[in-house]
Image: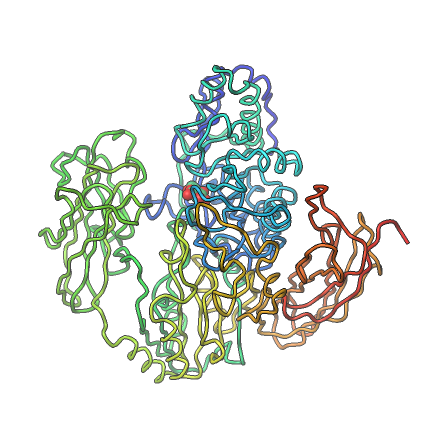
Amino acid sequence: MTQGRDLDALIDGLSLDEKAALTAGKDMWSTSAIEHAALPSVRVTDGPNGARGSSFLGSGTATAVCIPCGSALGATWDPELVQRVGEMLGEETLTKACRVLLAPTVNIHRSPLAGRNFECYSEDPLLSGTIAAAFVRGVQSRGVATTVKHFAGNDAEFERNTINSVIDERTLREIYLVPFELAVRDGAALGVMTAYNRCNGPYCSEHEELVTRILRDEWGFDGFVLTDWFANGTTVGAAHAGTDLEMPGPGRFFGPALADAVRAGEVDEGVVDAQVRRLLTVFDHIGALDDDPAATERSIDRPEHRAIAREAASGAMVLLQNDGLLPLARTIDSLAVIGPNAARAQIMGGGSAGLRPHHRTAPLDALRARLGGVDVRFEAGCDIAQSTPPIGGPSLVAPGRQPGFAVEVFSGDAFTGEAGEPLLTTHREDGRLIFFGPPTPEIGDELFSVRATSRFTPDESGEHTFTLVQAGRARVLIDGVVAIDGMTDPALPRGDELFGLGSIEVSATRELSAGTTIDLVVEYSSRDAIGIYGAKLGWRPPAVPDEMERAVAAAAAADAAVVIVGTNDDWEREGVDRDSMDLPGRQDELVTRVLAANPNTVVVVNTGAPVTMAWAPDARAVLQIWFGGQEMAEALVDVLFGDAEPAGRLSTTFPIRLEHNPSFGNFPGEHGEVRYGEGLLVGYRWYDARHLPTRFPFGHGLSYSSFTIKPPRRSAESFVPGDTLRVEVLVTNVGSCRGAEVVQCYVSSDAPRVTRPPQELKAFEKVWLDPGESTTVSLALDDRSFAYWDPEQPGWRIDDGAYTVRVGRSSADISHVVPVQVHRGHP
Ligand code: BGC
């Protein structure tokens, strides 16, 4: 992949203004080009759920493979699989004519409430970093750079643009920086993205200690550092810290402002040369400088990509509890499928990670399609919508029989289409009629208008609710008559949606009859909109007053029930943290009542982060499926009926109650800062130290098979720093089907000189075995397995003494303990 241009000569040939231009984006998603030097613009895409291309928050038309969310990938405990997922995303990034994937997200699950936990892998730094490194290797093997994000201390959304994360030095080094370090050192990441927040004082984009001293000097990172979107706040500070690229463009602090700072003598030109050299070195290395600037994005839905996404989805599913109910017998005649997430393909969390998947299948549809001969009855039981979901689905068909809306864009403010021929004709799959920036370049800063047309045929009779949120001015016409009018003056007040640039939601109701089609038109004018344009047409079906009772009755009447509960991409999204760990709405009541109505009930939990599960002791089977990506529904059917093993293990502890979690009392923060008061005791380190019971411990997950782990053999009785100690265990599948076991190795210091967590994960390996098959797992322990960070003489320190190596199936299920003596110098 090394292209080897003479970058010194190339940089010498650029003017100061040209070099400075390269340090800032050209627009939202691409870097600046310098034509005379044959330097093309390089396009970037989010990340991390897939390579979404231009389809931001449902805008655009490109579809992309949607992989399981980060907490799901963490739960695979399978770097080999995640590397293949990464390879697939590298290929997908190229189909979007992009060369940089804005992923992986490796912040830590500090609180169960953090809005972006679904994007992040784990509460444990080694698991996070190992998965991240594998992801990075996979993506980058296809000539695509990754940007490990968000560096650092961006472990919640509360006041994310200003908050100061106050993290003591040991905790920063031993927990929060480790995933970045492993992604850089073991994954050879080519990019790092700074976080919005401050970390122990400075903003992360101006953090010389983080960006230069630790990342570059200590870890040897030689890639580029870019800011999170709009995170840059200074010219001189960010340049001196070692940040290379301000995104998005046009630059506010880099670009022309950086050239001015050089001319004013505030920044040395050599600093800019170094920034440009780091950027071009990566772009040259991945071949991006030879790309065709005219290339456009494509949506390529490949069967082999579907297969990887499906393998990852079941590979991440964690069987939390099972008394033999799962896998379900194929002999059942009737199945009640219950829950607000059953008929909804809740396959990803919300925010910049969101994308338009190649396909979207709800669990209910996958069950119906695959269970020929079984009477499948659905009842939602309750509603969990926070904001009204966009109208969509099979009942919404645009002229020309395409699902969704036919969209015409016109120049000028005459939103009815009288402005003549449309400048652009496009399509949207649902009621999110949103544009990031002008829909076509020729519009520039001028006003434009949009007309979106569709026909809606409801399945149910009754009072239907239509809602409008607008960024600009819009109105909704039903059968040619204005039903909701946002064109009025003054404009509707601002609300929370569309990153705070959307209006409040306004609504209208209509009595509709099942099967009778209505015409739906949304007319939009870009008047008063900035940055984000368009409208969201939402829809709620008629309320079902007895929906809980109907669900309970359906469960009682069926041979078995599957109740699919969870959150959605409003409850778990970028920009806001949750304020409760409980399942939203009346879902806890729903689960409790369905469990009482039918003992053969499987509870399926469809969330990106832990939820309270007070009903768990009464459930025969509980399956955590995360936000499992576009193949989640198929993988769920595979697992429910035993065609696939639920091969995941928890990447994060599920506490009994929110108040038990380590960040409680120091979350989300106050007076502009969040103190990481629990220090090193993050996740299981805390529950172990406090002897707190958990709902399900870190590393936990059941198999459809069963395994024995023989007592370990170690390569030596003592560990000498600089060496590797090997711990080998024989694992045998003693069950009756092929299955996966994850052997986990924790290390504790018996008499530590300093505070140390009771045990810490230091090695793990996932193995797949046929019935009767055995294999030897070899776990390698090295210096870092025994070391802690010493702030007095900054560096990693290993104390002599007695340690215990603990091998088991979860942090709470240790099968064997082995003493190890550590001493410097050979005995
Ligand atoms: C997010 C980043 C993302 C960027 C571009 C920011 O709001 O924090 O993770 O890559 O937007 O969409």
Residue 124 in percent (x, y) is at 59, 56
Above or below, 457 relative to 218 = below
Residue 801 in percent (x, y) is at 81, 57
The answer to which quarter of the image holds residue 572 is bottom left
Q: Report the residue at 33% width, 48% height from top.
A: 58
Residue 220 in percent (x, y) is at 66, 36
204 or 784, nearer to the observer: 204
- What quarter of the picture does the N terminus occupy? top right
Q: Report the residue at 46% width, 55% height from top.
A: 114
Residue 88 in percent (x, y) is at 52, 48
Q: Report if residue 46 is visible in the image.
A: no
- What quarter of the picture does the C terminus occupy? bottom right
The answer to which quarter of the image holds residue 761 is bottom right
Q: Report the residue at 47% width, 62% height from top.
A: 626
Q: Report if residue 495 is visible in the image.
A: yes
The answer to which quarter of the image holds residue 424 is top left
Ligand 1's image quarter is top left
Question: Taking 506 as reference, is 265 left or right?
Answer: right
Question: Taking 716 as reference, is 128 left or right?
Answer: left
